[in-house]
Each structure stands twice: as C-alpha cells, then as structure tokens.
Image (cartoon, rainbow, N blue to C red):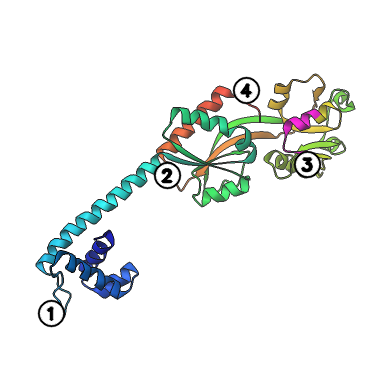
Amino acid sequence: MTIRHFKFFTTACECKSITKAAEILHVSQPSVSISIKNLEDFYDVLLIDRTSKQFKITAAGQTLYKCAKKILEDFDNINLTLIQQESLSRLSIGAGIAVGKLLLPRIVKGFCIENPSTNIHVNITTSENIESMLYGNLIEIAILENTINTKNLEKIQLSSCPLVAICHRDNPLTLKEDITIEDLSKQKLLLREKFSSTRNSIDNVFNKHGFAAEPIWESESALALINAVKEGLGISILPLQYIYAFNSPEIAILNIDLQIERKINLVYTSSRALSDTARKFIAFIREWFSDTEGQFIF
C-alpha cells in the first residue's frame, strides 16, 4: 500500500463522497474507487457499505481511517521537518557583477568557515536582474553597489567611498583651482563600462549639469583605467579607495567635488521574514566590512 491509497481513502471518508474526493484530489472518480478497492483486497475487509445509498464507512473502514490519518500526519511532519532543516542550512544570495566577481568569494568563504553546515547558493548578475530575483523570492538577500529601486526593499549600507576625478600629474587641469563638470566633459574620459553602478552615477551627474559623459575608453577593470591615466591618456573617475591603494606618484586627484559616492548595500524584501541563516550572514558581513574597511579593493 502507498501514501496515495491512504490519501484517497481518507479524503473520500471526509467528503463522504467518492465524486467530491476525486474533485478535490484532481483525479478521476474511478481512480479513487480503484484505490479503495485495492485497500479492501489488501486487508481483506469491506471499508465502505455499498448496500447503502449514502456513503457509509464500515467499522473496519473507521479503524483504517484513524490509522491512515495518523500515517498521513506523520508523513507530512517528516516532509515539513526535512524541508525546514534544509531551509535553515540554505541561503540564496544575489550580487552585482563587481561585488560578486571580486568581493563576495572572500565573504562567503569566511562565513562558511564559521558555519560549515550552511549551503550557500549564489547568483551574480546585473542589478536589474538581482532586483527581479528579490521580488520573485528567488534569492533571500543581495549585495549591490549603490542603489536600485528600493520599493518594498530594506537596505543596510555596508560601505561608502567618494568618487574622485584623477589625471596624470602633468595635466594642466591640476593647476586649476575650480574645476567644473563642463571642464571634465571636454577631456578624454576613461570610465567604467556602460550600465555599471559607478558609470550610472557619473552619467547622472553629467546629465544633471547639461553635459554627456562620452568616454574614449570603457572598461570593467579599475586597474586598466588607472594604468591608462598613468600613461596620460585621459581622466578617469573612480573610488578614492582605489587611488589610495595604488598610490602612484604619476596620478593627481583633481580639485572637484563630484558629490558621488560608491555605496555597497545589503538589501532584502520587506515582505519576507529573514531566515536565521540570513540573519547570521548579515551579522557576519557587517562585521566583515567593519574589520576590512579601506583594505579591500575591487
């Protein structure tokens, strides 16, 4: 006998109708009738009084109903326990490309060392895709640069760093006290790739002042842009963190406050209660950023 047999029989007993049971179970009426007949043949008893015009359970049927109901409850409890156990040890994380490519591996490794039984599943894609995955409950939390559509999303800022304009030390702009966005727009720009969080912030600032950021170089690599600046190929706009880390005497920071910050945020949907594993991960990553602030570059 199978769980299916017991399910069909108990449903028929509770509905007092084979027809209604079939509707609830989304099966044909003969399927329910055959399952009940199989039970009768297996236990060699009558479970339903077929001499009655109404659906009537025999004494043996009532006994089997109680036993079958207990079996089904135990079966459901087993499934629920295993599912809960799996969910407690599983965490789905999304990350933007820059964060996921160069930062997240170190974070996940550290967390897994402290929580070896946790099964972490990671999706690395664009911020727009991450947002959709959050709303679709495909991931529980995400780590992203800057901001996305924060409707119904909770946000925890993990890090912040200003963006600065840099050039070769021999560039005439280094002698100018007041530099404007218009001044930058006339230069050869070396910028991050289109649609990256950093590039979006730069484009927004330029557009706000009535100019367009039209780079001659576009790259996913900050190091590539810094090396191009060192060769005097143009001006780049990058996090101050990068400039301090590479500490090149050939590079100068221009005197312009772009009022742009690169922020790293942890986000999750406000409509979904966080699992214990997610809360542990959030506590871990906040401490990780606090301990490593200014030391990581990506």
Helix, strand or loop status at disc 2: loop
User: Is 136 on the left or on the right of 175, as rendered?
Assistant: left
Mark with earlier residue (1, 2): 1
Q: Earlier in the sequence, mark 1 or mark 4?
A: 1
* Residue at mark 1 to residue at mark 4: CA–CA distance: 83 Å
Horizontal side, residue 193 vs residue 76: left or right: right
In what quadrant of the picture does the N terminus appear?
bottom left
Q: Which mark is residue 295?
A: 4
For the point 31% across and 45% down, the residue is 81
282 and 210: which one is in front? 282
Residue range in magenta is: 218-227
Task: Tell me the amino acid under the disc marked 4.
Answer: Gln
Q: Which residue is mark 2?
A: 273
* Residue 212, numbered label: none
Measured as percent of width and height from the top left, residue 50 is found at: 15, 77
Secondary structure of the residue carrying tag 1 is loop
The residues tagged by marks 1 and 3 sit, at their Cα atoms, a distance apart of 86 Å
Q: Look at the image and tell me in which quarter the C terminus lies.
A: top right
Dot 3 or dot 4: first in sequence order is 3
What's the distance in space between the residues labelled 3 and 4, CA to CA? 30 Å
Q: Amino acid at mark 1?
A: Thr
How far apart, in angstroms, are the residues tagged by discs 2 and 4? 33 Å
Please name the residue shown 71% across and 43% down the image.
200
Give percent across and percent down for residue 237. 76, 33
**Discs 1/4, front:** 1
